[in-house]
Image: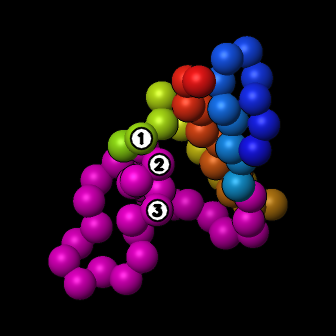
Amino acid sequence: IWAEQGQLVCEVRDAGRLTDPLAGRRPPERGQLGGRGLMLVHYVADLVRVHTGDDGTTVRFYLSL
């Protein structure tokens, strides 16, 4: 987490891969385990960038200060 040009920036990385291009943009199905964290980030952040590849996934989001 850091501040940059009037924005708070948070970056999270892991070895997982996202295969759904709309991950976090639609609500999870009833009874589904997980799937709410990225959706919450999309609701509160000004900008969300998701990059996924062979080495894992990086999510970076920006909040105006």
**Mark closest to the chain's N terminus, 1 or 3:** 3
Magenta-drawn segment: 13-42
Q: Tag 3's secondary structure?
A: helix
**For mark 2, does the 10 Å Cα neighbourhood hold few (<14), some (14 to 19), or many (20 or more) residues?**
some
Which color mode does the image show?
A: rainbow
Asked whether the residues under the numbered discs 3 and 2 touch, taking CB atoms below 8 Å apart as contact, a structural biologist would say yes
The structure residue drawn at horizontal position 65% and vertical position 24%, both measured from the top left corner, is 7
- Measure the C-alpha gap from mark 3 to mark 2: 6 Å
Mark 1 vs mark 3, foreground winner is 1
Q: At which x and y percent is residue 11?
A: 71, 47
Q: Tag 2's secondary structure?
A: helix
Q: Identify the disc placed on residue 37.
A: 3
Residue type of the residue flagged with mark 2: Val
- Identify the residue position indicated by label 2 in the image: 41
Depth check: give the residue in front, 31 or 57: 31
Asked whether the residues under the numbered discs 2 and 1 touch, taking CB atoms below 8 Å apart as contact, a structural biologist would say yes
Choose top left, top right, bottom left or bottom right for residue 33: bottom left
The structure residue drawn at horizontal position 66% and vertical position 32%, both measured from the top left corner, is 8
- Identify the residue position indicated by label 1 in the image: 44
Q: Is residue 17 above or below residue 65?
A: below
Question: Quick check: 47 left or right of 32?
Answer: right
Question: Quick check: 45 left or right of 12?
Answer: left
Q: Can residue 49 be seen in this view?
A: no
Q: Is residue 64 visible?
A: yes
